[in-house]
Image (tube, rainbow, N blue to C red):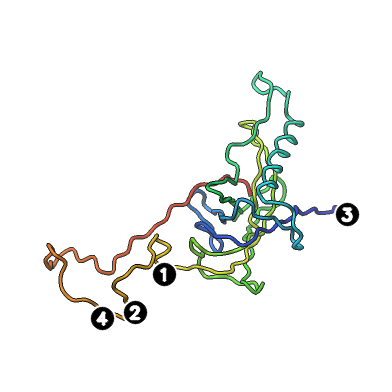
Amino acid sequence: MATSTRNTRYVTPKGTLIYPYLSTPDTKFSTHGDYKAEIELPEDAMLFDAKGKPRGTILDFLQQSLEDSVEKFAEIHNGKKKKGKAIEVEEAQDAPFYCNDGKLFVKFKLKAYVEPAEGEAFTQAPLLFDAKGKKFSPPKNPWNGTTAKISFECVPYYNAKDAEAGITLRLKAAQVINPVFGGEADGEDYGFGEEEGFDSSTDDMPEGKADGFDEEDDNDTTGQDEQGDGQEEGDDDF
C-alpha cells in the first residue's frame, strides 16, 4: 500500500495582513484564481511548527529553504545540456519574502483549482478559524489591516525554462484574530491622528458655506465613494 506524505506545516505569529484573499480567490490573473495573503511581521519574528514548537526565526528558515532548493535542483540539473549549453541552476528572482525598514513581509498563495500531471483535477481552499480556534466561513474577504496567523507549507520548485529554483509558500489555513471588513476603517488607516477641533460625536454640525464656493444644482457627488485596491501578481505554483 502506498504511503502518502504530507509537507511539514508551519505557523507564523500574528501579524497584519495586506490585501488578503481568504474567502474567495483572486481571479485577476486566472479563471479559477488564487487564494492569497501577505503578512507583515517584525524582521526577527519566530516560526512555529503545527504543535507550537519554536523553529527559529522565519527569515532564517525562508533563506535556508531557498538555498536548499537551489542546491537540490543544482545536483539534479547542473551540467546537463539544454540547447547546446550546460545548465547552471540559479536562485529564482521572485522569492515570496522581503525585508523593509525592520519589517518582514511574507507572501502565501494557494491555487483554487489544480490539474495534476497524474490523477483528477480538484479544488481547494484554505481553512479559516476565528480567535477561539473555531472554524468559520466569512461571506467576504477580510480587508487590509486584518490581524491573523498563517499556517503554510514551504515547497521547493524548479522552473526548467529559466533554470531557476525557488520556494512557494502554500496557504493552508488562517486564524483570523481581529478581522477588518468593508466600512470598518478609521482615520489611522489613512494616516490621520487626533487633532484639536470639531468632534462629530459631541459637537453640532457647523453651518455655512466654504469661502469661494456657491451651491450648484449639477454634479452632486454626495454618496459616491472611491473604490479599488490593486493586487499584485504572484507565481503560479499551488
Tell me if residue 60 comes above or below residue 136 in the rendering.
above
Left or right, residue 120 beside residue 103: right
Q: Secondary structure at mark 3?
A: loop
- Counting residues from the N terminus, which is met first, the one under dot 2 or under dot 3? 3
Q: Are marks 4 and 2 in contact (CB under 8 Å)?
A: no
Residue identified by numbered label 3? 1
Q: Separation of disc 4 and disc 3 at Cα?
A: 76 Å
Instruction: Classify mark 4: residues with Cα within 10 Å, few (<14), some (14-19) or many (20+).
Output: few
Amino acid at the residue labelled 2: Ser
Identity of the amino acid at label 3? Answer: Met
Q: What x and y, as percent, mark residue 215?
A: 12, 68
In the rendered image, which residue does mark 2 sit on? 201
Disc sitting over residue 204 in the figure:
4
Compute the Cα span from label 2 to label 1.
Answer: 18 Å
* Secondary structure type for disc 4: loop
Q: Residues within 10 Å of mark 1 (few under 14, many from 20)?
A: few
| Mark 2 to mark 3 CA distance (whole Å) | 68 Å
In the image, 38 versus 59, the foreground residue is 59
Residue 128 lies left or right of residue 3; in this view the side is: left
Please state if 54 lies on the left or on the right of 146 as rendered: right
Tell me if label 4 and label 3 are in contact, CB under 8 Å: no
| Left or right of residue 219: residue 124 | right
| x then y, percent, for residue 10 | 71, 56
Tag 1 secondary structure: loop
Q: CA distance from mark 4 to mark 1?
A: 23 Å
Image quarter for residue 50?
Answer: bottom right
Marks 1 and 3 sit apart, C-alpha to C-alpha, by 53 Å
At 81% from the left and 54% from the top, the residue drawn is 4
